[in-house]
Image: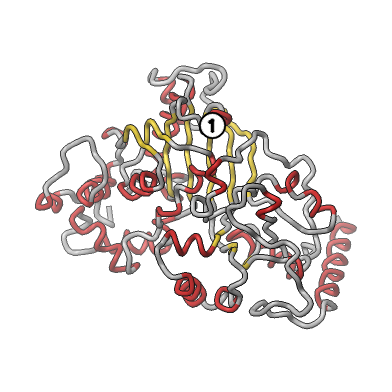
Amino acid sequence: MVNFTLGYKNNRVRLGEKMASSGHIVLTSHSRPGSNHLSPIHWGAEDARTRGPIIGSVSNQSHRNVIGTHSGSYSVYRAISVAAGRLDPAHVPDLTNTSPVTNVGPHNQWFDPKKIVSFDPWGHLVVNEFKDHLKEGFDIRPTIAITQARLKLMEMQEAIAQRRLQPDGQVLLENGDVNVTKIAIDPVWHIPGLADRFEVDEHTFRRAIFEQMGGMYPELVTRSDLEVFLPPIGGITAYIFGNPDTLSDPDVRLACRVHDECNGSDVFGSDICTCRPYLTHGIEISVEMAQRGGNGLVVYNRKEGRALGEVTKFLVYNARKRQKGGDSAAKYFERTECVAGVQDARFQELMPDIFHWLGVTRIDRFASMSDMKHDSLVNQGIEIIERLDIPDELVPEDAHVEMEAKIASGYYTSKSPKAIEDLDSVVGRKIEE
């Protein structure tokens, strides 16, 4: 223990000396004298090498061809690790044996610069596609990783006990575990593509991000030559049930749930919303579809509290519960807008990108009531055959306020929605209960 501590302290000192000896601070607002673009990015090109690598690492500033850096919202922890002397700032990952467990793409959608604008479609193929760059010393890092896993969920055990599902030994095991392929995706924004998707001028788009993020990335407004931005936000995780190789085949039926993060419900089981019940229902229909020879897909987006954040969400909870008349469906969205200034910041316009990346053109069973998710997919040319609302028995007691408010606002339902004048009668639990 003594030797380890001394070694750690000595290492930290050496890293501190290395940082201190690195010279003056170089601002990123303008191109660095002597730098060159050895790796230009041609978004939407038909092969990876023509498109060019995404280089967001900071080990060699002259190689960078993007704004921002890798790892999304976790990039700040990397910086702290360097500052604390626990990480060598010059460290380059050893990518041996990190290749995907299954192939994805390329699909035709990758070659349309307007189809995928929020992440790098070649992000999982760095080691193979850019091996020459890697040999030359370019620090190119994957922005997508694909692995295998087993899910252990009590809801799957309940589905087996209630005979809604039967173990098959491949997708669903006897103990209720579920075999999946899972994919992690970090955000990589093509700025012109995002501006086009939101139908705003690119300059306006760049300036708004720069100003509203406190001026964190001056290159947004000073470096129009840099068209790719690695934002410090959460990414996407996708879970595939069945055979990933047939996911893009429209003749193979597909069940799907697109889910936006809700820590309170998904992890801790809070009953004020339907998030975990709807998520596990989506997993169940995905398992069922895979067992019948089709595939299932669950897309999990890191957009906590409608992308307004958990603090804002909890403030809204308090405001809803304490307002005159209590928590009612009639004022559900109004309280969110009063606190946050907007009802929803998830912007489902970007959500279809992962379907284009996977080559999906048709969803046979879509477990979502959201009109925004449905419309975004359909507007991007993805056919939806059947929409599934959450079964009544899965709606928690305190979540009826949310359900009736959403249905009244235009969410899909197979049942008759309540009249607007009847929404005041749908009231949630009091805050002190």
Q: Crowding near pointer 1: few (<14 within 10 Å), some, many (20+)?
A: few
Q: Position of residue 63 (x, y in %)?
A: 75, 66
Horizontal arrangement in the rendering, residue 73 relative to residue 21 (left or right): left
Res. 216 in view? yes
Residue 74, how many percent across, how many down? 62, 59
The image quarter containing residue 100 is top right
Q: Which residue is rendered at x = 21% and y = 59% of the image?
A: 331
Q: For residue 269, which quarter of the picture? A: top left
Mark 1, secondary structure of its residue: loop
Q: Which of the pair 9/202 is nearer the observer?
A: 202
Residue at the (41%, 67%) spot, across then down: 200
> Relative to residue 102, is residue 122 depicted above or below?
below
383 on left or right of 211: left
Tell me what residue is drawn at x 41 percent, y 29 percent. Answer: 285
Q: Is residue 2 left or right of residue 113?
A: right
Q: What amino acid does circle 1 point to?
A: Lys
Q: Which residue is mark 1?
A: 152
Q: Is residue 157 visible?
A: no
| Outermost residue, right side | 3
Q: Residue at x 51, y 45 (%)?
A: 354
Q: Count how many numbered circles sit on residues in the image.
A: 1
Q: Is residue 307 above or below residue 144?
A: below
Instruction: Name the image quarter holding residue 41.
Output: bottom right
Q: Indicate the position of residue 334 as horizontal and vertical percent values.
A: 24, 62
Furthest toward the bottom, the residue is 24
Is 336 left or right of 220, judged from the image as shown?
Answer: left
| Residue sitting nearer the eye, 251 or 167 | 251
Q: What colouring method underlies this structural image?
A: secondary structure
Q: Quadrant of the N terminus?
A: bottom right
Percent position of residue 128, x then y: 75, 44
